Amino acid sequence: MAKFEKLSWSAFDRSCRKIARFVREKQKAGLAIDKVYGIPRGGLGMALRISHLLDIPLVVDESKLDSRTLVVDEICDTGRTLSEFSKKYAGRYALIATIYHKEGAAFTPDYYLKLKTGRWVLFPWETAKTTWMKHK
């Protein structure tokens, strides 16, 4: 069994498109989302791609967050990062979406695509050498 699950660029793009479709459905239902913010580092590429798919601005300055902001991150593993973010910026984002979510994490995103398995996820912009996997 492989030590990691590798997400390809095409799978990453499909995931961003699924999140964009989810957001469009929410917008049609009346949820105002007009910008996207990516949690540094892993959420930055997602935010950029989703901003293009939805034709909404990419926010890179946390002071620009408001209740109309979609927040994205590639993974919610321990949940610590998103838990801290949600407390610090309560009321200053519309919803949080991720590609992966680990069951039992300290935080559950409003929307996620996949449950994380026990294997380390290797994203397309990473290599085994540059990921935390080398520390496992």
Image: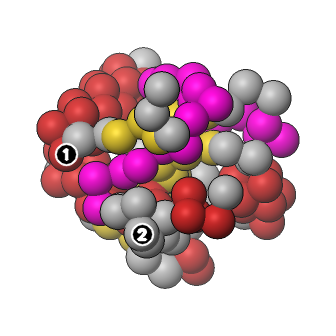
Extreme residue in the front direction: 1
Q: Residue at x 56, y 57 (%)?
A: 133
**Which callout, 1 or 2, points to the residue nearer the camera?**
2
Task: Specify the quadrant that holds the C terminus.
Answer: bottom right
Q: Residue at x 17, y 53 (%)?
A: 52
The image quarter in which residue 87 lies? bottom right
- Residue 80 lies left or right of residue 66; in this view the side is right
Nearest to N terminus: mark 1 or mark 2: 1
- For label 2, the SS is loop
Q: Residue at x 60, y 52 (%)?
A: 93
- Residue 125 lies left or right of residue 75; in this view the side is left
Cα distance in 3D space between marks 1 and 2: 18 Å
Q: Residue at x 28, y 53 (%)?
A: 124
Residue carrying label 1: 9
Q: Amino acid at mark 1?
A: Trp
Which residue range is magenta in the image? 105-125
Say if the magenta span includes residue 111.
yes
Prevalent SS, magenta region: loop
Say if the magenta span includes residue 93.
no
- For label 1, the SS is helix
